[in-house]
Image (cartoon, grey):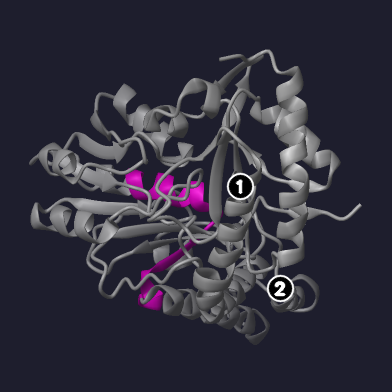
Amino acid sequence: MKTVYLDNNATTAVDPEVLDAMLPYLRDLYGNPSSMHTFGGQVGDAVETARARLAALLGASPKEIIFTSCGSESDNTAVWSALRTQPEKRHLITTRVEHPAVLNVAQYWEQQGYSVTYLSVDAKGRLDLDEYARALTDDTALVSIMFANNEVGNIYPIQCMAETAKERGVLFHTDAVQAVGKMPIDLSHLPVDMLSLSGHKIHAPKGIGALYVRKGVRFRPFLRGGHQELGRRAGTENVPCIAGIGMAAKLAGEHIQDERVYVAQLRDKLENGIIARVPDCMVNGDPENRLPNTSNIAFKNVEGEAILLMLDQLGICASSGSACTSGSLEPSHVLRSIGVPFNYAHGSVRLSLSHYTTEEEVDYVIEHLPGVIETLRAISPFKD
């Protein structure tokens, strides 16, 4: 059975060119990049080539890029550094719809006595910029707001929010894990102080990420030990994966137009085809300002996990907007924050595409998903 993979916001396939870039450092060039000898030196050169490629994708300087293990480590490091370099400040600002890599970190620091403002969103998942401006105080150490939402795809106004923070002398971090590679980001004109990203969202392997730290921003390492990453992140570098994310960054820059046009057209065809064939469904989030690859659709009076199980039997990979915890199904914190009605939120499904997605695959989903919903509604315990 053919696999139709529409779960690219969870992880992406490793690009063949990325794999080719990694293999020499898994097989032949196994030296330590910190070694003084030539054999290790050429491995160190590969790390710096990857750093330059990632910096070029972001419009940054290579020295502003720190390699990490993942987006979560980058997020944790950004928050840790901002708080530790400003011990006199005890206030954080984030949103109610952040990824757990930021939301749970904020909650941890709240337990340590910090004050945290969680910005609310409206029915389309949009932030209130007036609420944000009012939340900034002289005690604010950091604003951490995602560039784009992983569940519904909303793109947030990072440019103006970062500018507002800068005017108040407040550090600004953005979790750009879902945005990098799907839309242009130019940090030479975007005044954020720190930005997190993850390799496995841009067709690099899992286990590699990066943190951008603007030159001049005070920084405190999260991991201490050796002198790697200019003393900013200890631990022997994961050279194969670093080479991979470097190649992935190069390819992402080349595919940006495909993401913005081709992938967006496929997403719209998929979404419109489903909506036209399935009654009582709705698009979650802001259809006018979202990632080009993401569609989150809520189906009334069905349960999300059941949809996913039946789609899986058809070879279709997707994600649900609800999470199962201890046998009790609850809609995700994002959908609850948006205020999606419970009988819709319970049946929300996220479909996320990539430039590998084909029109034939989209047609296959449009053909089979309506029947799945019809079957489930016939046996659903949920009623109006």
Q: Residue at x 61, y 63 (%)?
A: 266
Report the side of 213 relative to 49 (left or right).
left
Q: Is the C terminus in the top left, top right, bottom left or bottom right quadrant? A: top right
Residue 349 percent coordinates (x, y) = 61, 39
Corner quadrant of residue 42: bottom right
How many angstroms separate mark 1 from mark 2 (CA)?
44 Å
Mark 1 or mark 2, earlier in chain: 2
Label 2, residues with CA under 10 Å away: few <14, some 14-19, many ≥20: many
Residue in front for this viewpoint, 235 or 26: 26
Report the side of 137 relative to 37 (left or right).
left
Q: Tell me, yes or no, whether the highlighted magenta stretch contains residue 328.
A: no
The stretch in magenta equals 60-80
Question: What is the magenta segment's predominant secondary structure?
Answer: helix
What SS does tag 2 mark? helix
Residue 232 percent coordinates (x, y) = 40, 60
What SS does tag 1 mark? helix
Residue 276 is marked as 1
Q: Residue at x 57, y 78 (%)?
A: 44
Quickly name the residue at label 2. 22
Q: Residue at x 21, y 54 (%)?
A: 161
Residue in front for this viewpoint, 272 or 354: 272
Which amino acid lies under the numbered mark 1 shown in the image of this protein?
A: Ala
